[in-house]
Image: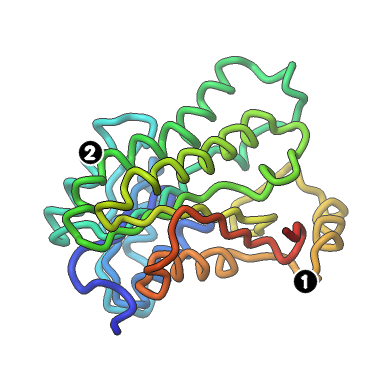
Amino acid sequence: MLRYPQKGAVVVTGAAQGIGRRLALSLVAEGVDVLIADWNTEKGKAVAAEDTPGTGRRLYVQTDVSDEASCRRAVEAATDVFGGVFGLVNNASIFSTLQMRPFWEIPAEEWDRVQAVNLKGVFNMTRAARAALVASGEGSVVNVASSTILFGRPNYAHYVSSKAGVLGLSRAMAREMGADNVRVNTLTPGPTFTEVERATVTPQQKAAMIEQQCLKRPGGPDDIADPILFLLSRQARWVTGQLLNADGGMITH
């Protein structure tokens, strides 16, 4: 059995950096075509042009996941260029730029923007891609949430609540799209250290997080991209509506 369908592409949001970038390049290495959907044009084009192994093709389309029309344009581009869409990874998120503060100090405008990207963005992009996913005959959606929803991390209430919403939305989508053979799963990464700077994490805090894990090393983008590759693949054809936690054993359940 081939690991992935031979026709169509995977749309990856937030693919210009971090986990999304690693996932996009990993899919290309597997021979899968990828639509790089991201707001950052400079970084998105750079990922599309990176000299990396693999036969998968790449296309960058500037995308604002909080805007329905922008999401539709990204999916239409993937369909036009690659002949369809069989996979969608909703990875775009606001997190690394957020200032840590209690919920009563979070500006309402910041709250709304986080919800618009992190939660509504999943709704917008999945709705835009639904027809293409159904047409593929074996669609797979992976929504990236966060292990913070499992323990309620303080001082990021807007982020934690948006990601908790992603889990609920994913489970509802799995019920609603299962009859069309479209799978929907949620991946919850733990602390993941990429090229994206996180000014709010000191070396001491990083060491403390690693100490809480069963596996005593920092998690990297490959540690998150690889489980997503599995959930997108035909090897996970009987898996839907599930939460897969990838955090080095920080949380056991």
The residue beneath circle 2 is 72
User: In the visual, does 83 lie left or right of 206?
Assistant: left
Number of numbered discs: 2
- Label number found at residue 215: 1
Left or right: 248 in relation to 129: right
- Crowdedness near tag 2: few (<14), some (14–19) or many (≥20) residues, C-alpha within 10 Å: some
Give whichever of 184, 69 is nearer the camera. 184
The answer to whether residue 186 is above or below residue 28 is: above
What is the secondary structure assignment of the residue under circle 1?
A: loop
Q: In this view, does 185 lie above or below 220?
A: above
Q: What residue type is labelled 1?
A: Leu
| Residue 82 position within the rendered picture, expressed as x and y whole percent measured from the top left | 16, 61
Q: Can you say which quadrant of the picture contains the N terminus?
A: bottom left
Rendering quarter of residue 95 = top right
For residue 49, above or below residue 141: below
Residue 124: mark: none
Q: Residue at x 34, y 48 (%)?
A: 37
Q: Which residue is drawn at 41% across and 36% down?
A: 121
Residue pictured at 57% horizontal, 60% vertical = 244
